Amino acid sequence: MLGENDMAGLLYYANEYRKHANMPQSALTSTECECSKAELLDRINHLGGAELIAVNVRNPLAMDPQTHCHARGTLFLLTEGLVIVETAQGRQLSPSQTIGWMPPGVEHAVQSYGPTAGCGAFLTPQFCGDLPAEPTSYPVNPLVALILQKALSWPHGTPLDLTRMRLLLVLLDELRQSPARPLQLPWPQDARLLGIARALLDDIASARTLEQWARWAEISPRTLSRKFMLETGMSFAQWRQWARLTQALEWLATGRAVKDVALSLGYDSVSAFIKTFRQALGATPSAYFQAQQRGQPMPASSAAQPAAALE
């Protein structure tokens, strides 16, 4: 339970956040902890030093995915752009104003679309036990965002002092109480179904029916339907719809026009695409990206529960 002094401290940080929440990204300054990329990778892949290492990240160009893993768990607060994280289990969509989580030791590849900016924080494994064992994301939490911002100035090479350790524990407690969003596009495990999923992503506008895909994979339609739901938590139609929406976000983030995206995804009309987009993400494509640019989190919707929204 928080004591009186702890509560006073939290109120102070909450007030500071209110004053600086709308601070533009360019206002974030370099910190005393700056180091080369090689030095940073060496620090985050060793467990000595600070229990939490936080760094500013800004990429003016899209990042190409390279599979890698870290000895520490990774939190990433994205303030600009769109990132797709892929693991052996599936694909995680992380638009701006979300906090992504990657457990320690999990191989993953990160693909960005357009310029991206944010804050990365790397946790030693002993502080990861109460966080999800699989990749996930959280809606932005103002207190977590402020603590991560403050952590940018913390030294990397020495263990956290008592004051900073208290803030780390508050950060973890806030995340534990936040609604986690699991992988939005999980891979099926059956090799035949995985082949269908990969082929769908390669030809995202394909109009093949479930029966036609079943023949393509030499599997019965009933088995395909049953196993897809069992292994991904979505029906085949829901998974395909969410795959198209993921692709839509990738293309829209690079500046492609809504009409071009809708037709490239195989929709009969722009209005049909916008309707599906709104049902799944709570806003039209233009409103969605305008909110991201203003730094406003989107309303809780089927981004957290995609299958239910796409029935």
Image: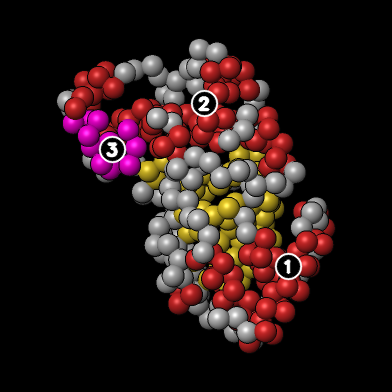
Q: Mark 1 = which residue?
A: 14
Q: Mark 3 = which residue?
A: 229
Q: Of label 2 and label 1, which has the lower sequence position? A: 1
Say which amino acid is labelled 1: Ala
Tell me how the rendering is colored.
secondary structure
Query: Do the CB atoms of the residues marked 2 and 3 lie less than 8 Å apart?
Result: no
Say which amino acid is labelled 2: Thr
Query: Do the CB atoms of the residues marked 2 and 1 lie less than 8 Å apart?
Result: no
83 and 267: which one is in front?
267
7 and 265: which one is in front?
7
Kindly report the secondary structure that dominates the magenta region of the rendered protein.
helix
Q: Secondary structure at mark 1?
A: helix
At 28% from the left and 36% from the top, the residue drawn is: 228
Tell me the distance, in whole angstroms, between the alpha carbons under discs 2 and 3. Answer: 21 Å
Percent across and percent down for residue 182 are: 43, 50
Q: Of label 3 and label 1, which has the lower sequence position? A: 1
Q: Mark 2 = which residue?
A: 276
Tell me the distance, in whole angstroms, between the alpha carbons under discs 3 and 1. Answer: 43 Å
**Magenta stretch bounds:** 223-235
Instruction: Report whether residue 181 is seen.
Output: yes
Image side of residue 16 versus residue 159, left or right: right
Percent across and percent down for residue 107 are: 41, 56
At 59% from the left and 74% from the top, the residue drawn is: 170
Say which amino acid is labelled 3: Met
